[in-house]
């Protein structure tokens, strides 16, 4: 089973700031990595798939990059609606494991 | 529009079974796999397994292999997840999710159900 490790677990930021969240995999993933946003009491929402492809309807301030075992999610200019928890997920092999999450706080 | 609507919250005793449903609409049901993912309180997400709705083939996480059954009713465009021999550690929100952008083995998920809280308590 591929282990996914996100950092940081929690971070504080302000509206307008640029933030980066990192996800490291225990083995290479090729391009099979996604990022989700989750708000309290809600289902996760897909933001990025295949490392850097933006899901339809997701604002362009979200971007993904990386390769091999290290990947990043960047929010270029934080908006009030972006304060949430973010998860990475690998879908290279079974089971499709998730990172432990990064909670983004004001 | 694509919708996945799950059945309501359940309270079960240890050792019992639970069956959660997920009704799909707004797309061709048999063209997409359906996955089940759970989230214990305050925890991350855990991949449980999936069904290819076209032919009913299933793949389960090794962790749940002996206790989970995923099935579908194509006429009702509904997928089911049954988990048996429940224990307190199974208390979680259970989500169905549509598989879309896929890798060599599994997929990411573009649409999710609203979640079903299953509470296991004596």
Image: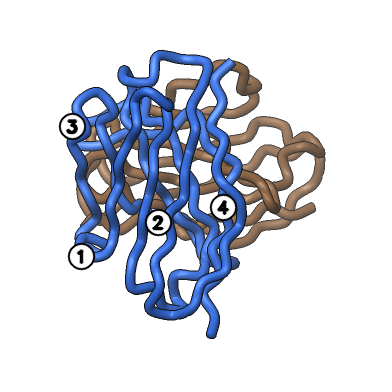
Disc 2 to disc 1, how far (Cα)? 16 Å
Label 4 close to label 2 by CB (< 8 Å): no
Residue neighbourhood size for the residue with mark 2, other residues' Cα within 10 Å, grouped as few (<14), some (14–19), many (≥20): many
Disc 3 to disc 2, how far (Cα)? 19 Å
Q: Position of residue A23 (x, y in %)?
A: 42, 49
Give me the chain that's brown. Answer: A
Circle 2: element type: strand
Residue at the far bottom in the pictured view: B122
Which residue in the protein does label 4 denote?
A: B116
| Labels 4 and 2: the sequence-earlier one | 2
Circle 4: element type: strand
Q: Position of residue A7 (x, y in %)?
A: 50, 57
Question: Above or below — where is B1 with respect to B106?
Answer: above
Can residue A24 be seen at all in this image of the molecule? no
Are tags 4 and 2 found on a single chain?
yes
User: Tag 3, which chain?
Assistant: B
Which residue in the protein does label 1 denote?
A: B66
Q: Who's the residue at 45% across and 37% down the image?
A: B97
Closest to the camera, between mark 3 and mark 2, is 2
């Amino acid at each position: 089973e591929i282990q996914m490790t996100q950092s940081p677990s929690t971070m504080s930021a302000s509206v307008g700031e640029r933030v980066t969240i990192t996800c490291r995999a225990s083995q290479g993933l090729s391009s099979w990595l996604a990022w989700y946003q989750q708000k309290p009491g809600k289902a996760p929402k897909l933001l990025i798939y295949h490392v850097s492809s933006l899901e339809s309807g997701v604002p362009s301030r979200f971007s993904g990059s990386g390769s091999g075992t290290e990947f990043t999610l960047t929010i270029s200019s934080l908006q009030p609606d972006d304060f949430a928890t973010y998860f990475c997920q690998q879908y290279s092999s079974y089971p499709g494991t998730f990172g432990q999450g990064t909670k983004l706080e004001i | 529009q694509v919708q996945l609507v799950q059945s309501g919250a359940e309270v079960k005793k240890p050792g019992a079974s639970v069956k959660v449903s997920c009704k799909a609409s707004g797309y061709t049901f048999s063209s997409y796999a359906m996955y089940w993912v759970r989230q214990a309180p305050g925890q991350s997400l855990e991949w449980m397994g999936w069904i290819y709705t076209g032919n009913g083939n299933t793949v389960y996480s090794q962790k749940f292999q002996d206790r989970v059954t995923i099935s579908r009713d194509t006429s009702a465009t509904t997928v089911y997840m049954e988990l048996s021999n429940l224990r307190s550690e199974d208390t979680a929100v259970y989500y169905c999710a549509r598989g879309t952008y896929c890798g060599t083995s599994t997929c990411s998920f573009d649409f999710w159900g609203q979640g079903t809280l299953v509470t296991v308590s004596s």
